[in-house]
Amino acid sequence: MSDNSLNNLPGGFKGMSQDMGSDQTVFKGVQWGKVMMWIFLLSDTFIFSCFLISYMKGRTSTVVDWPNTSEVFSLHVNGVPVPLLLIAIMTFVLITSSGTMALAVKYGYEKNRKMCGWLILATAIGGLTFVGMQAFEWSKLIHEGVRPWENPFGAKQFGSFFFMITGFHGTHVSIGVIFLFIYSRKVFRGDFDKGKRGFFTSMKSDYVAIEILGLYWHFVDLVWVFIFAFFYLW
Amino acid sequence: MSDEYNQKNTPIKAQSSETTSGSSGSSKDIDYVRPAELPEQDLYHGHSFITKWIFCQDAKVIGVQYFLTAVFTGIVGLVLSWLMRLQLGFPELVPFITAEHYYQFVTMHGMIMVVYFLTALFLGGFGNYLIPLMVGARDMVFPYVNMVSFWMFFIAVCVLMASFFVPGGPTGAGWTLYPPQAILPGTPGSNMGIILMLVSLSLFVIGFTMGGLNYIITILQARTRGMTLMRMPLTIWGIFTATALAMLAFPALLVSCIMMTLDKMLGTSFFMPTILQAGEVLSYGGGSPVLFQHLFWFFGHPEVYIVALPAFGIVSDLISVHARKNIFGYRMMVWAIVGIGALSFFVWAHHMYVSGMNPWFGFFFATTTLIIAVPTALKVYNWIITLFRANIRMNTVMLFCLGFIVTFVNGGITGIFLGNVAVDIPLSDTYFVIAHFHMVMGIAPLMVIMGAVYHWFPLVTGRMLSEKLGKWHFWFTFLGAYSIYFPMHYLGFIGVPRRYFEMYDSPYVTSATGMNEFITVAALIVGFSQLIFIYNIVTSLSIGKPAGKNPWKANSLEWLTPEVPPAHGNWGEKLPVIHRWPYDFNVPGAKEDYITQTTPPSEVISAEVEKT
Amino acid sequence: MNEIENKETVASTHKIGIYLWIWGLLFVLSFFSYMVDWFQFQGLLRWTLILIFMFLKAGLIMAFFMHLFWERYALVNVLLWPMTAIACFIGLMAAEAKYTVLTRLLYFFTGG
């Protein structure tokens, strides 16, 4: 089995051509579930890209003025408008949760059950905070009269794209939060140490599941980076 | 000449036999295959009727389920096409075909055939059945997800069929569902019909994503020992590339479905410009209809290749097996498939030359379209060279393969016409286009599907299909399809527009009437001749000749399972070990005219096999 | 890079320091991109800064939090090459959007 060990394989492009030309697996040492998540995320990237491309097309081709986002999304602190304050906080919360998730993956692989579980829980709470703040942001905008079909500040498409894109991203976050809570329970219960069989799939659990969940969570963060740049800052 | 060839090869052979005989374990060294990287797959074995046949996790059963569901929807699509043809050939003959119904038939026929029939059949049906068998896996890598994938597809089909029965009927916007007309009053089915269509498509995309992940990862990560990518049958390459395309193209469809649903239900204006209807300004404004077209065709063009690439792959294998010759230029074929797949994301707007998009795009897309014709043409040459001086067996499968090549070349060449902006503009939205895409992605893939059914039926059921009925079926289908679509080119040239309910007294009538009647009669005959096929399948299930193992003397793994038809887990005790590609037919020096993929080199030491 | 690969992939876990570093960098970059709005930079400068910070953040998340830096090139290439299709789509849609707005201005406002 010595030729299977990853360390003896060449790296870089040489390694790539050797991996591609080899039998059995193309991605050496990568578990099925992890490849699945990566390919799914690639597909999901295309979904978000299509949303953002549509947004670019819609925003550029409308002849009505696009609202100034730093005014629309400003919060009043002591009567002084602070531009994009809430969005900035949301960004920081999401990055924080991404960091805790990365550490959870690390401790998962080290089979540090307690630490891993607490970090996943912290991530879930971070995600929940993010969704809560997003709900606050939505209700604030709705109070100001922005709707998917109309917008008092300018182009109709502003409201449409805002609710659709942040809604779709928020759905991803919410799904992630649900899974984070489920997985933190699984970690605390010790499913991954014992290799307990899954309820639906009847397949054995493994700590790689934490990394897969982590990939999803980081992707959600990654999408937010793009939404933050293109929708709020641009 | 053959002597010369042998002489040239002798020293190399002698050398290799020397080295092997010199070492102690002679056969062991040349038969060496790397040890397994992964542990045996953990499988869930069904134990009741429900877990074995309905909510089944076995990819083979799921494949058959996909196949039957897809064929059912395909038959619905076929009947819809008869109704359309009846109206076109004999206007007002059937009283219930009103203009509204006609448009609904057009729409549903198109969507059913492209998405719910061909895509589901090739990837869901053939993909599920063949991928684990051909790469030497015990099952798909995520059997549970695979099962959910089928049931999502099933629900999508149910939602689609439900749209026939809602108030207003199914949508009548044409299969491309272009807004604004798709969701405005006046278009048939602009309320419930279009919503159900969009929901159904979204469900299909979700279900297909689950299946697609399985297909891709099974092929990339679960091959058996010795199975390198360049030893996979071309069928697998076709299905793999098509699935990869689907994973990247369906997102655009999903996004356009979501946005159009919002336009319809919430009144957003993604695709809706300012519209005056009956003198009133609607609440929409500022949206961009051409954006939908871009999104749709960013999905739609790869979709064409999602249907075509598995057909290319399958037909290559069928030709090779039934012509008893290795496929010419295997690596070229693989790269052509991959190249077509990659290029298919850069050609989409050639469907939109008359849409009012940025006129400069015509240059870009005409160029990429002509570039994509190059690998496609390479494949056609390779099929023909494979047949050249081959030991062709003129059975039903081979007939369908030959039928495929002819129709595909025909449809491909008209595609070159349509890919050029200057030629496309007078021809677009005429029957020439109808003829083109039915030839190239209707009849051609269908020929492959039928050939594939005749080829793999013995594997799935253990019994052969009747050759005699098969030949009748082929000639009816092939000649009939040609008599339907060949005259349509002419109709297109004289300018008969597509999607017109009736020509009334337009000047086309005199020259087109007779031809339209002829096409309708041919369509009815071809449609009914499929009953031969169904009869053949149904009767052969019980009275067909028992096939035994490997009836076609093929090399690829699916025929080499311990049980035929293969059982759950496919391979019995031990996974197969692969030593060669699946195309070693008629190898000089071999005892038989085929060397299976599992035959170790030590058993065919005197044969001049290709190094793969 | 090769050294890291050899050292790190064995246990497939990395030192905690690298995560904390990346975490910190992400905060700093987010702060910078927020500052772009705070100081109300406009025009080309604004767009360049937004894009630079965006790609840096995305790159850090993908490379370190999603472990792409330590993955073998086969996976990295399979994941990144499809983005060319998206890049092409973005470029063409940008041109298309400009054309749409120009025709709208021409026909609806100045009168064609």
Image: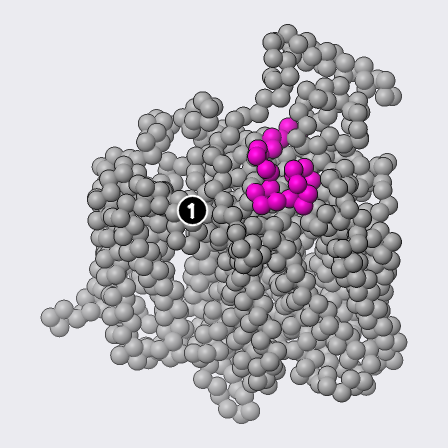
Q: Amino acid at mark 1?
A: Met
Chief secondary structure of the magenta portion: loop
A79 or B156, nearer to the observer: B156
Q: Which residue is mark 1?
A: A203
Q: Position of residue B518 (x, y in %)?
A: 87, 72
Q: Is residue A155 above or below residue B587?
A: below
Can residue B12 be seen at all in this image of the molecule? yes
Q: Quadrant of residue C71?
A: top left
User: Which residue is found at the position 49% from the left and 47% from the top?
Assistant: B44
Quick one: quadrant of the C terminus of chain B?
top right
C77 or B559, nearer to the observer: B559
Q: Position of residue A168 (x, y in %)?
A: 39, 64
Q: Which residue of the protein is positioned furthest toward the left in this rendering? A: A78
Q: Is residue A6 above or below residue B559?
A: above
User: Which residue is found at the position 52% from the left and 52% from the top?
Assistant: B47
Q: Which residues are magenta?
A: B559-580
Q: Is residue B2 above or below residue B481?
A: above
User: Which residue is found at the position 85% from the left and 72% from the top?
Assistant: B521
Residue B8 as seen in the image, left or right of residue B219: right
- Within-10-Å neighbours for mark 1: few <14, some 14–19, many 20+: some
Chain identifier of the residue bearing label 1 in the image: A
Quick one: quadrant of the N terminus of chain B?
top right
Residue B279 falls inside the magenta stretch: no
Q: Position of residue B65 (x, y in %)?
A: 61, 58
Residue B573 falls inside the magenta stretch: yes
Q: Is residue B322 above or below residue C10?
A: below
Total numbered labels placed on residues in the image? 1
